Amino acid sequence: MSPTSTIINRFSHQLATYLCEQYMAPICYLHAHRARQERKLIQSIQYRLKKSNQVLCVTDKSGIFHTGDANDYEQKAQAYREKTKAYIELENAPLC
């Protein structure tokens, strides 16, 4: 075996070991519990938004959220596009 392949094999083994230690190690109970709670919270919010036809969006850089009716949001977006004339609607998808 050449010296280069030995170095590559050793590096590959060290990398695999490092990745296993960092990403495959079990997490503590408190972190797992919090992750489950946050997942349930997000799923609950998503369900309620879909059920009531609401939109959730960030209003500005400060991270404030706004909820509103999806139809109103689409109407305001359409009015903005018509007012600014900055956007055109493509008839077909050019990237497909």
Image (cartoon, helix red, strand yellow):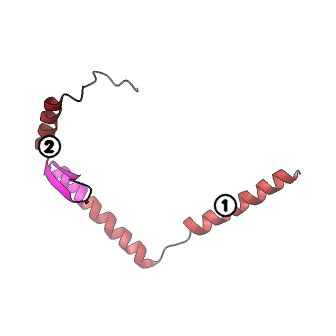
Percent position (x, y) of residue 18? Answer: 64, 65
Q: Give the residue drawn at x 23%, y 54%.
A: 60
Q: Which mark is residue 16?
A: 1
Query: From what the image shows, is residue 5 above or below residue 79?
Result: below
* Mark 2 secondary-structure assignment: helix
- Kindly tell me whether residue 23 is visible in this rendering: yes
Query: From what the image shows, is residue 26 above or below residue 87?
Result: below
Q: Give the residue drawn at x 34%, y 25%.
A: 93
* Residue assigned mark 2: 73
Q: For this view, does 79 lie left or right of residue 96?
A: left
Residue projecting furthest to the top: 91
Q: Which mark is residue 66?
A: none
Query: From what the image shows, is residue 13 above or below residue 34?
Result: above
Residues shaded magenta: 45-69
Percent position (x, y) of residue 91? Answer: 27, 21
Quadrant position of residue 11: bottom right
Q: Label 2: few (<14), some or many (≥20) within 10 Å?
A: some
